């Protein structure tokens, strides 16, 4: 999320996320044509799991729902479906970033 949209005050955090995305795209290009090697990134938004759970409980992200930026917070299953898409054995996709954020970064 931080690498895909502008969030004031998040320069150091966003730079690391953007570097991961760029690194993945470079690896995908370097491995292009290699037997069944694909490199993609799943970029989750506010998901009710892991580190974000405490922030959600504290109301840190409520403004996104109140402003209709998203209809709900993400769930682990939302992210799992994106990962499963990339893991399909005959998948033709490589070098891509899939934002799974309910439209938050629009």
Image (cartoon, helix red, strand yellow):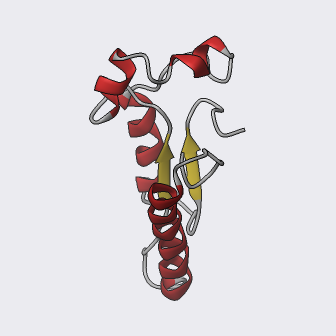
Position of residue 101 measured from the top left corner of the image (x, y, whole percent): 56, 35
- The image shows residue 19, relative to residue 42, as above or below, that is below
- Asked if residue 90 shows in the view, the reply is no
Q: Is residue 37 visible to the viewer in this orientation of the structure?
A: yes
Q: Left or right: 77 with respect to 91?
A: left
Outermost front residue: 9
Picture quarter with the N terminus: top right
Q: Nearer the viewer, residue 14 or 85?
A: 14
Is the C terminus in the top left, top right, bottom left or bottom right quadrant?
top right
Residue 81 in the image, given as x and y percentages of width and height:
44, 37
Q: Which is more toward the observer, 28 or 16?
A: 16
Residue drawn at (54%, 83%) of the image:
32
Residue 35: quarter of image: bottom left
Q: In the displayed structure, does residue 4 sit left or right of residue 18? A: right
Callout count: 0
66, 22: nearer the viewer: 66
**Above or below, 105 relative to 31:** above
Q: Is residue 10 left or right of residue 68?
A: left
Name the spot of residue 45 as percent of width and height, x first.
50, 37
Residue extending furthest toward the right: 106
- Compared to residue 94, the image places residue 33 above or below, namely below
Residue 44 placed where, x, y %? 47, 42
Q: Quadrant of residue 69?
A: top right
6 lies above or below 64: below
- Residue at 42%, 59% in the rendered image: 89
Q: Residue at x 34, y 16 (%)?
A: 57
């Amino acid at each position: 999320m931080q690498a895909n949209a502008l969030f004031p005050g998040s320069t150091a955090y966003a730079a690391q996320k953007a570097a991961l995305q760029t690194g993945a795209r470079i690896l995908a290009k370097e491995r292009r044509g290699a037997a069944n090697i694909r490199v993609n990134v799943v970029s989750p938004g506010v998901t009710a799991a892991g580190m974000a759970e405490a922030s959600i409980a504290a109301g840190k992200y409520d403004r996104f729902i109140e402003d209709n930026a998203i209809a709900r917070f993400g769930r682990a299953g939302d992210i799992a479906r994106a990962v499963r898409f990339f893991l399909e054995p005959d998948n033709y996709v490589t070098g891509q970033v899939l934002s799974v954020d309910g439209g938050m970064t629009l």
